Image (spheres, rainbow, N blue to C red):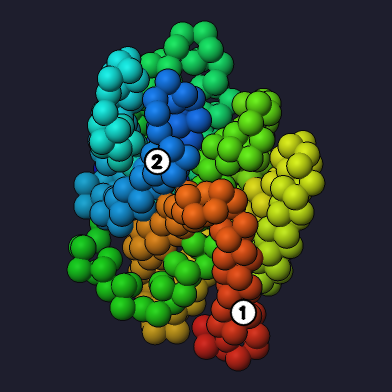
Amino acid sequence: MISDWRPDDPAFWRATGRRVARRNLVFSILAEHLGFTVWTVWSVVAAQLGAYDFSTDQLFWLVALPNLVGSALRLPYTFGPARFGGRDFTVFSALLLLIPALALGWAVGSPDTPYWVFLLIAATAGFGGGNFASSMANITHFYPQSRQGAALGLNAAGGNIGVSSVQLVVPLVIGAFGLAAAGWFWVPFIVVAAGCAWLFMDNLATAKASPREQLAVAGNGQTWLMSFLYIGTFGSFIGYSTAFPLLAKSLFPGSAWQTVAFLGPLLGSLVRPAGGWLADRLGGARVTLWNFAAMAGGVALVWLAVGSGDFWLFALAFQALFVTAGLGNGSTYRMVPAIFGALAAASGHSPEYGRRQAAAAVGIISAVGAFGGFLINRAFGMSFAAGGSPAPAFLAFGLFYAACFATTWWCYARPVGAARLAHARV
């Protein structure tokens, strides 16, 4: 337990803080990466269940359910580091990943496994989705305000790349060892991540906070505004990442979707720190505003590519959605500590109070945002069930991004909106 922690003190940061923060960040990324791999493994498994007589809508349910459970778990998970310590909760949350990994390997071992069992096991994959909230809430305390964007961006990107890892590795693993290996393959890595967290991460006494103090942010309108915007950025990233394999297989039967499925999540993850970096320099509101405009344009490009009937054009156009979702993830997340830091300063509270408020808000924002992954998959599933086409879903996504653009401008980008936050560089 570290009791003396002053990351905003330049001398302390140079002498001690930077080294400790970097070490915790590295092993936080490792555990969070494994969380994302387990959370999204069904995006590949569902597309490989040809031996089972499941409809396209049923398969999208298997992809959507981990997103629903993961989003619900993010709220309680965000209280974990403040209640039990960042290191201790990272170990616990990593070990929980053994349940969905082992259960998946068991379920696909028999062609007689009923659909409801698949639904139940897919739901346990949501444990991995909760890891993001606890990891981000923990890392927030380790870095000074001026470095929050880059640190949170790297932590999130390291986790997000887990989606790409799954979609690159799992098809190869299944091809070599069978479908059951899609779950069992991750077991030794999970054990290693939990062990490293126990040995090399730290608990911070200054990060302790009561659930009442943390839940107070639920009464702040800024929390819910940012939650709405995060549906548009992270919800899009996780939704498109998990939907792409099944969507591509449904629209272009026989296509080589396995060879490119990993690329979009990888690009979206790699550009996420760039979104935080741009927000540090240009302001998160400005970057987020124009990014939503680009996302709306990306939806139009993808739909035109679907109409062309060319799989490779479709796959290429989809990369625009992944890149813009990744940039938006970084810029919106950078806005959170800026907003709550400004509100804390305006009310006479300390920077550490602002960090605790931001960490608590992260739980709600990431929980609501992750729900977007469920909505996207269900939108695709219902569109196929109703008319055999994803057109209604794409139309809804475009309209939603337009609403996000308007909200960002009204609340944060226009001068009056900025003045409400004490002229913070939001």
Q: What kind of element bears circle 1?
A: helix
User: In this figure, which residue is indicated by the disc labeled 1?
Assistant: 406
Q: Is residue 146 left or right of residue 260?
A: left
Does 369 sit above or below residue 119? below
Looking at the image, residue 205 sits to the left or right of residue 352; the answer is: left
Point out the residue furthest to the bottom here. Answer: 416
Q: Residue at x 54, y 37 (%)?
A: 246
Q: Residue at x 26, y 54 (%)?
A: 76
Crowding at dot 2, Cα within 10 Å, few <14 / some 14-19 / many 20+, comes out as some
| Residue corresponding to mark 2 | 58
Q: Is residue 363 above or below residue 305?
A: below
The residue under the point 62% across, 26% down is: 258
Quadrant location of residue 299?
A: bottom right
* Front residue of 74 and 56: 56
Disc 1 or 2, which lies upstream in sequence? Answer: 2
Q: Amino acid at mark 1?
A: Ala
In front here: 225 or 107? Answer: 107
| Location of residue 199 in the rendering, given as x and y in whole percent from the top left corner | 33, 27
Determine whether 332 is above or below 197 in the image. Answer: below
